[in-house]
Structures are given as structure tokens and as C-alpha cells.
Amino acid sequence: MNFILIAVIVLGAIGIIAALVLYVCSKRFAVYEDPRIAQVNELLPGANCGGCGFAGCGGMADALVKGADAGSIDGLNCPVGGQEVMSRVADLLGMAIANGEPKVAVVRCNGSCEHRPRISEYNGLRTCAAMNTCGAGETGCGFGCLGCGDCVSACQFGAININPETLLPEVDDEKCTACGACAKACPRGIIELRKKGIKNRRVYVSCVNKDKGAVSMKACKVSCIGCGKCVKECKFEAITLGQNLSYIDADKCRLCRKCVEACPTHAIRAVNFPIPKTVEPATSTESKTETA
């Protein structure tokens, strides 16, 4: 009986000591979490898409609170929630934010089947990443879209799909949140996040081919050949030429579209502009003066 009592006392003592040690450790090594992080996280959309540059909304919330403590949250943006969500976050943190211009994903490849014919057949794993690893793909262009739809699979919002006729990705401006998932999924970097522009209008070079003109034209009839005509035509210095490829700076572009007219291969696209009205020729009078 004494042995049982001693065992109970010993076990009880060990339990009390262990509880005291755990209590001291919990106080000593406790990690404080700012309650504002949870409040900000509730305001975020919870998509966890990574478009903000962090692994998820929790990382974004932590960065916003730390930025507020440092005095600025400029540069931090939730592409899914947009300006509305960021305004609510700024109000919660007592900060002011600059109005960020909305962006949209842009596919910088215009090489449809018509302009960029297939010269081989790929029978491997049907993903852009796998096809790109194997080589140039099924066309002669080693820079253009592979058409397997990795960008479609990466988009959580159903904002991008493959056109069955052109085999090129098409972005729905209304659904696109500019999270950047499609751009990260593209192994050739043909998808870019650009400003939506005034009235959703934008002008950009729909090509990323860096080969010399003669080589790129053999692979695709609508590729940029680096001729520089668009650079000379632009009066706002919005276009630069490097590595045989033109690029339009959305911040400097004034949407005059003169570069579109100057491009000999039609590699520059103007999106959401009104179709110019055709001028009908004046009809001649049918009445004729009769001579006697």
C-alpha cells in the first residue's frame, strides 16, 4: 500500500513540475502576433493566388502591418481585391495609399496557325513546360506561345482560355484580376501584366521574338523584325528597341496608334479602340443635261 501511495505522490510531483516548466516556457518563448494581422487578413479576399508577391493572404497581411509600422504601405497591392480592398485596409491601419492603376494580363504573341504554321508534331506530355524543355515546340518560333494551356490551368478566376481556331490564349478583361499566375506559369514569358489604360484601351507589341528579322519572319509572318520604324514614328519616346525587338512603355504611350500604322508586319496591337468609320464616296448626279 505504501508503494502505491509513493508512486502516486511521485507521479503527481512530476506532473506539477512538468506543468510549471511548460508554463514558464510558454511565457518565455511566446510569439506575439499583432491582432491587426488577423483583422487585415479578414479584409483580404482569401484567394491565396500569390499575385501580391507573397505566398498567401496571411503573408500579405503581415507585410501590410509591418509596412504600416514603418510608415508606408506603398508598393503593396492586392490585385484580386483591387483598390476597394486596399482602401479598407488602409483605413484600418490608418494609412494613405496611392491610387494604383488597374492592370490586366496581356498575351504578347500573335502567331496563330495562319501566321505561324506547324512544322513538326509533339507527342510528349501536353504541357507548355514540358514542350518548352524539349525544344522549340511544333513551330519554327522558339519564343512564341506553345498553346498547351498552362496559363489556363494556373488561372483561378477563369479569365483565360485557348482559342480553338488560333490556339492562342485569350484574356477576359472583366474576369482578369492581374494576379500574375498565368504570367508565372508561361515558360516563355509571353504573358505580361500591363495597365488597362484609359477606357480599357492599350497598345503593345504582340511579339517576344528576339531573332533577327529575316529569321523571325521565316517562323512567323507577324513577328517583330526590329526594323525600328515604330521607334522613329513615336513622338513621345514610348518605344525602345533592343535585341531585335520593340517594346512600348505603357507609362509613356499616349495611344496615338501611329506605331500601329508604321509596323510593316502588323506586330503591334491596338486593343478596344473604336473601328474607324469608312467614308462613303459622294454619289454623282444622275441627271444629265440633254443637248439639242
Image: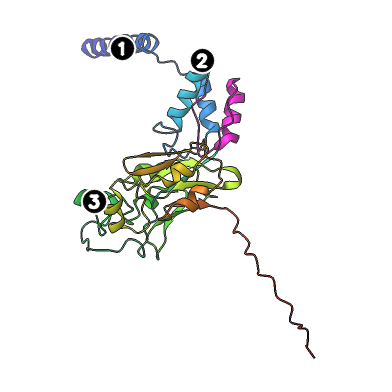
Circle on res. 18? 1
Question: Where does label 2 land, which residue?
Answer: 69
Circle on res. 272? none
The residue positioned 62% from the left and 25% from the top of the image is: 91
Q: Position of residue 147 (x, y in %)?
A: 33, 57
Q: Label 2 crowding class (10 Å Cα cut-off): few <14, some 14-19, many 20+?
A: few
First-in-chain label (2 vs 3): 2
The residue positioned 65% from the left and 68% from the top of the image is: 280
Magenta span of residues:
74-101
* Element class at badge 3: helix
Residue type, label 1 = Ala
Can residue 158 be seen in this snapshot? no
Residue type, label 3 = Ala
Q: Are marks 2 and 3 in contact (CB under 8 Å)?
A: no
Badge nearest the viewer, 2 or 1: 2
Give above or below for 131 relative to 166.
above
The way the protein has been coloured in the rendering is: rainbow
Q: Label 3 crowding class (10 Å Cα cut-off): few <14, some 14-19, many 20+?
A: some
Does 94 lie within the magenta span?
A: yes
| Residue 192 in the figure: left or right of residue 142 | right
Question: Where does label 3 land, which residue?
Answer: 130
How far apart marks 1 and 3 lie (CA) works out to 55 Å
**Which residue is nearer to you in this view: 136 or 267?**
267
* Element class at badge 2: helix
First-in-chain label (2 vs 1): 1
The image quarter containing residue 193 is: top left
Where does the N terminus fall, quadrant-wise?
Answer: top left
Numbered circles on residues, count:
3
Does 59 lie within the magenta span?
A: no
Badge nearest the viewer, 2 or 3: 3
Residue type, label 2 = Asp
